[in-house]
Amino acid sequence: MMLWFVFALMTAAAIFAVLLPLGLGGRKQTGGDEATVYKDQLTEVDSDLIAGLIGPAEAEAARVEIGRRLLAAADQDRDAPVGSNIRLRRAAAVLALVGLPILAVALYLPLGSPRLGDFPLAERAPGGDGKQPLDSLVAQVEQHLEKNPTDGRGWSVLAPVLARLGRFDDAVRAFRNSITYNGETADRRADLGEVVAAAAGGVVTSEAKAEFERALALDANEAKASYFLGLAAEQDGRKADAAEIWRAMLAKGPPDAPWRPLVQAALTRVVGEPSAPALSQETMAAAKDMNAGDREAMIKGMVERLATRLKQNGDDVDGWLKLVRAYLVMGDQEKAKSTLGNARQAVSGDTQRLKQLNEGLKNLGLDG
């Protein structure tokens, strides 16, 4: 409705712009009529003659000349097409009042529509792939930070996005700037160490290790730093040290900590327990992005499927160990003990499998 009101105001302004010159051109010049001027001049000639300012002959000559001009002016007024001019002005006014709005509507209807929906800016952005909007956003933030390099909040927002895009070198710079302008915290140091390791292809370099150690100095419970220091020990061939770090994490960490499955899998890897293959990067990323409820539901679903399978195939020692470990990670001690008893009963007829089961339970910290 507001749009139509604006259009109406614009149309009215255009009409008045057309009619104003016509109205001014049609006004009569009543005070400056030529015939009136000449009549006044005849009166002045008679007054001058009576006053003796001019002679009779000069007065007569003046009367003749003024009379000639008066007649010429009268003939010109008589010949002027006054009615025609009025009719033309009226026709122009009607055309402006009626024709101009009709013309505007006739042009608008095929070219536009007041019912046309909005076209959001995001849909007008160039590029066909889904990353384009994110890349454009990142470019805008980077341009902003070039002009405002001390904007700590901008660096803290940009850094994890760069890491997610795989621009690890740029992410390292962004995390360093975030620490410089926002201050040093344990999680910022741990995040910096993580992207330094990612930039090195997953190797925990001495530079990354130094960042994790700084993080633990600020907060001894910083889980990411502890995990990566364990990974550094594993990469250096010190598997016992790695296992000690990860066992300590599991012992003091909360039962519902989202990192527990990852740490348990790493511990299984270094102590030589039979275990499932490591989680794929896609699964880990999906679990990281989930909220606590969705993550718990996903884990419970995996555990239930494993439990169902073991009911059908009780000879799978590796499966029993995985199930016991899963219940321990979930903090369900009762189910872990119950599963332990079921596992021993299932393999009780096979001495070799029972021995393998007991060794695995010892590595889990359970009485074999």
Image: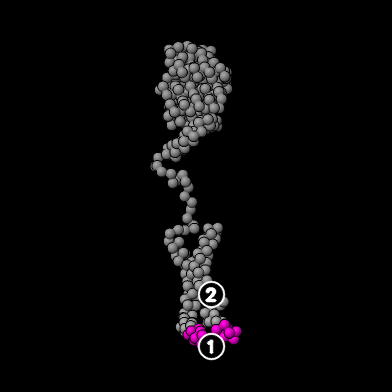
Q: Which residue is mark 1?
A: 56
The answer to whether any part of residue 63 appears in the image is no
Residue 139 at x, y percent in the picture? 45, 36
Estimate how packed mark 2 is, as few (under 14), some (14 to 19) or many (20 or more) residues with alpha carbons within 10 Å: few
The answer to whether any part of residue 85 appears in the image is yes
What residue sits 49% from the left and 58% below the top?
A: 114
The N terminus lies in quadrant = bottom right
Which dot, 1 or 2, sits closer to the camera?
A: 1
Residue 316 at x, y percent in the picture? 44, 20
In-front residue for pair 28/116: 28
Instruction: Say which element carries label 1.
Output: helix
What residue sits 53% from the left and 58% below the top?
A: 3
Residue 338 at x, y percent in the picture? 54, 20
In-front residue for pair 331/235: 235
What residue sits 45% from the left and 66% below the top?
A: 103
Is residue 351 within the magenta segment?
A: no
Question: Which numbered tag is attached to residue 347?
Answer: none
Magenta-highlighted residues = 46-68
**Disc 2 residue type (three-letter):** Arg
Is residue 47 within the magenta segment?
A: yes
Q: Is residue 46 above or below residue 261?
A: below
- Real-space Cα distance between discs 1 and 2? 41 Å
What residue sits 50% from the left and 75% below the top?
A: 90
Of the two numbered discs 1 and 2 on the same chain, state the one appearing first in sequence.
2
In-front residue for pair 252/66: 66
Question: Would you say the magenta stretch is mainly helix, strand or loop?
Answer: helix
Instruction: Say which element carries label 2.
Output: loop
Q: Which residue is mark 2?
A: 27
**Disc 1 residue type (three-letter):** Pro
Residue 190 at x, y percent in the picture? 51, 22
